[in-house]
Every structure is written in structure tokens, then in C-alpha cells.
Image (cartoon, rainbow, N blue to C red):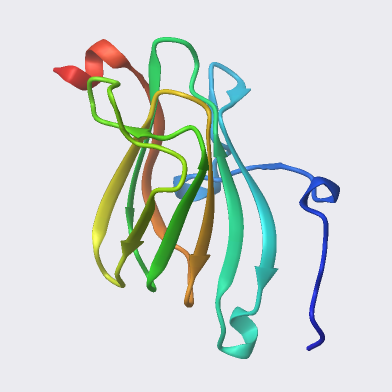
Amino acid sequence: MKAAKIPTDQIEWQVFAGPGGRPAEHDGVPFAFIKELSDRRKDGRGYAYLLRLVPPPDHLVRIIAVARSDEHVFLLEGGYCNKAGDLIASPGAYGLNVEDSPHSAFCAIETVGYVVCTGEPDEIRGLDVVPIETARA
């Protein structure tokens, strides 16, 4: 394979699919989007994409997943928060979810992350929007 240089602004955002392949929508409005950058899984390699989460006001996007391969996540914009909506990770933060590890993420502000999986992407077990007050409880 030759080197690939593709301006990411030429790749359209697609609505991300959650559990069961359902589009990530809240009240009919998409809240999670993906830009696939490379997919070399058929060659025994990894998968890279940008993930954009856009929570409605006073809500959190909640992701619950299990890593099916090592997953590297680098925050480009926005950040992760705790269940109370308080920012706990900002742009430049890096995380590694090792294969078979359950993990979660919460976002209260628009967030974009660069994700690289060494093989298969996560098994998404939950992807929804919840009011911040509900998440605190």
C-alpha cells in the first residue's frame, strides 16, 4: 500500500452507529459522528477514525464499551467529563483502552477524538444522551 494523504475536510462526517447498528440520535437529532481515516483490518492491521460527539445543552453523551483490540484515543477538541458534567480531560489528553477492557466516556461539550484501534474497534454496549442531573444520581 502506498502512503495515503487525504485532507480530512474532504471526508464527510457520518452518523455513528450504536448498539444494534442504530444511528446515534436523540429526539431525532444525531449526536455522534465518525470520519473513517483508514481501515486495514482485512490485512491484519488496524482501524483509525475521528469521533465527534455533540451533546444537547444540559446533557451528556454517555458511551459504554469493551475494547476488542488495543484502542488509542487522543483528544483533539472538547473533552471528557465526569457524571456531574465537570471537565476531567481536555485537548491533548491521551488514553489507552487495552483489549478486553470495559470502559466508558462522558462528554458534556462538543468533543473530537482521534481513535486508533490495533484491530477491531470497540464493542459499543451503550451510546446515549442523558440529562446531567440524571447522570449525577
**Considering only vertical position in the picture, is 136 above or below 77?**
above
Q: How many marks?
A: 0
Give the residue drawn at x 39%, y 48%: 93
Task: Give coordinates of residue 104: x percent, y percent.
Answer: 29, 46
Q: Residue at x 54, y 16 (%)?
A: 27
Q: Quadrant of residue 46?
A: bottom right
Question: Between residues 7 and 54, which one lies in front from this camera angle?
Answer: 7
The quadrant of the rendering that contains the N terminus is: bottom right
User: Which percent across, then down, holds residue 77?
Assistant: 54, 37
Q: Is residue 121 above or below residue 114?
A: below
Position of residue 65 in the picture relative to residue 133 (left or right): right
**Residue 108 lies in quadrant:** top left
**In the image, residue 131 above or below residue 15:** above
Q: Position of residue 120 (x, y in %)?
A: 48, 72
Q: Residue furthest left?
A: 137
Q: Residue furthest front?
A: 92
Left or right for 67, reference 25: left
Q: Quadrant of the C terminus?
A: top left
Q: Is residue 90 above or below residue 44?
A: above
Image quadrant where residue 63 sits: top left
Residue 61 % position (x, y):
41, 29
**Which residue appears at 42% of the width and 35% of the height?**
79
Farthest right residue in view = 10
